[in-house]
Every structure is written in structure tokens, then in C-alpha cells.
Amino acid sequence: MNTYNIALLPGDGIGEEVCMEAVKVLRRIEEKYAVEFKITGGLIGGAAWPEFGNHFPNETKALVEKSDAVLFGSVGGPVNAQFEPQWKDCEKNSILAIRKFIGASINLRPAPIFKELAHFCPLRSDIIGDESFEILVIRELSGGIYFGEHSRPDANTALDTSSYDRPTIEKIAKFSFQAAQNRNKTLHSIDKANVLETSRLWREVFETEAKNWPEVQFHNLYVDNAVQQLVKWPKQFDVIACPNLFGDIISDLTSVFPGSLGMLGSASFGSKIETGLQTETSDMRPVSKFIHLYEPSGGSAPDLEGKNVANPIAQIYSAAMMLRHSFEMHEAADSIEAAVLKTIQTGFRTGDIYAEGQDETKLSCSEMGDKICEYL
């Protein structure tokens, strides 16, 4: 029996509630497949502050290091408390810090558009059509303007520097073409190569990599054209590869298509983490492994905390992504996604995707988890 160690970091707000439903699903997967999940909880975000005075304490870092994957909830507190020590810079000091800690370099954010939930999509029905589809945004996380120099040389001047190197772009290019090959064989690469030198290098690398994937229909798009096309004709897209800044914007745009942030899981792939010393050789080199982070795309929604009304599907989707990408349990991941789809198709809804007057049944957060487990 395979055994996997999972660091469970629920965080703040609704994080605990939705994480518990994902754990419920994972326990059902244990019953169906020859696998054991050793799930250990840890504190992060505002939840860690009262005990440690830190949003990402060393104890949580140690837990992450010992784990095969991280299932993350959400962090952040009430808007009117953002300047209190427990919440000030909470997101920056926790989610951005843990991504840096695992060396996260690539982010996946799928946006599923269900025909059963088309009335929640902000796009017109004639634009999205009458069939379900999904857009996968792949975002580079380690380079670009977010990680360049930021300064104010004088009171009237501000400077933000963006840089990319060829190996970084080659890594996400290979990953994106592989993802497209495994899906519908269509890839759009987003840049601003008519203006930016970093985008010219980005386009050069992607065009070179495209020669290795003759079955993939490859397209370059300027970012301004891309956002227009996503709104006018989203079904032309399947996999979209973006540098860091553009990926932040594009993934936020596609996140509204499903009709609720409660439907969106995500994955951030770590590049390397040192976990100790290699003792079987004489050189005592550090041992490195890849640790990936899985989290819903929505926030902590502190106004919903403790009410058992949050939508756990994003967290459950994130768990399915963990099975697929960290543990290579593709059949189990497929079964979770199929159970979610059946739950939606049979009319079960949490409040965020429930419409009065429709033939639907409104469920609580825990009831939604139960229903998905039932269909597993």
C-alpha cells in the first residue's frame, strides 16, 4: 500500500470548514484505492499568530519539509482589521512565503464552465454555448516584474524592473506544451512582444519549443488581444501560458467564468526543497525533492466563517489536483471530478451557485461534501 504524507494548512476564515470536506473525500478515496494518507494539520496565516506571533512559523515549515504535498485552505482576516498585527501583511507573509519556501515556479488554475451553471456565468449564453468546457491558465511564478527591483529613486519617480532568463521560460514552455498535448492539443502563449524585451524572449523560447510538439496547435497572443478574445470567444482556448504579471490578470479574468470562486482549485508546483542529508554516500549532500501546494483560488471569506455555508468544491478540486500531480493517482482524481460533476448535474448546490425557482436542492458545506462522497 502506498502511503503519502500531506500537510494540511486550513488557515483562516472558511479554510477549516472546506478543508474538512476535502479530507472527507480523501478518506473515501482511501477506501476505494490501495493508498493511505497521513494528514497532519499545521497553523498558517492569522491562525498561527496567537501561538507563534508569526504567519508562517518554523514549526509549519518543518511540517511542509516532511510532507509529500501541501493542501492549503486560505488566509486573511476581516477587512476592518487589516492593520491589526494578526492580519497585517497576512497574505504576503503566509501564502507568498510558502510559495517561496517550496520554490514554486508554475501555477495551474483551471476554470471549469458548467452548462448547468451557465446562468451564473457573466458572459452571455450565446458566447459560452450549451456545452461544458474548461480553460487552464498556466502562470509562471518565479520571475517577471514581481521579483525585480522596486524602488523610488526620488519623490517623483518609481521603478519596477522585470526580467526573465531562457531556462525559466523553457521550463514553463515544456510544461505548457505537455499539458496541451494531454488535453485538447491547443496552446495560446500570452506576451507583449511588440513592446517588451522580456516578451520577445518569451515568444522566441515558445516558438522554438513548439517545433517539438507538432500535434499541438500553437498560437501567440498579445495580452490586450487575449483579454478581448477571452470575453468574446472563450471556447477557442484550452491551455493558456502566461508570464507572471499577465498570468495574474488572465487567471483573475477566467476565475469569474464559472460563476463562483468556490468552484476553482489551483496548484503551485515547487521546484526543489532540501530535506536533510544524504547519509548513504560519503559526501553528505542535501537531499532534495519536489513539494507542490494545492489551494482554492478564492479567499478566506471571514464573514462566512462558522456558518457551514461555504462551497467546498474548490478545495475538493484542489485535492483532486494533488492526487493527479503529486501522487500520479489519475484514476482517483478522475473519480473525484466525476463525482463533483454528477453532484452538480443532479441539482445539488451550495448557496453561491443556488438559484431560487430552479429544480435544485440547497446544501450546506458539509452536506455538499457528503453528497460528493456518496457519488464516489
Image (cartoon, rainbow, N blue to C red):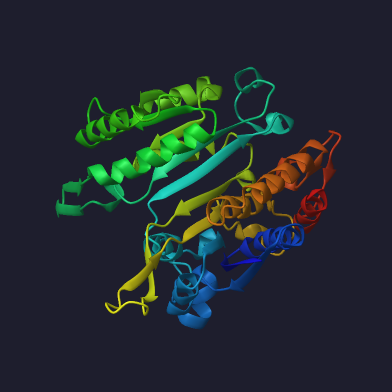
Residue at the extreme left:
154
Q: Nearer the viewer, residue 65 or 261?
A: 65
**Residue sitting nearer the eye, 155 or 232:** 232
Determine the residue positioned at 73% across, 40% down: 341
Residue name at image x 79 percent, y 36 percent: 345
Q: Is residue 253 visible?
A: no
Residue 344 coordinates in the image, percent (x, y): 76, 40
Q: Residue at x 48, y 67 (%)?
A: 87
Q: What percent of the width, then of the height, locates residue 313?
A: 68, 49
Taking 363 as reference, is 137 left or right? left
Residue 245's spot in the image, x, y percent? Answer: 35, 42
Residue 16: x %, y % from top left = 65, 65
Residue 122 visible within the image: yes
Question: In the picture provided, is 26 more to the left or to the right than 84?
Answer: right
Q: Is residue 179 above or below residue 58?
A: above
- Out of 128 and 28, give the one closest to the viewer: 28
Q: Quadrant of the N terminus?
A: bottom right
Left or right relative to 142: residue 341? right
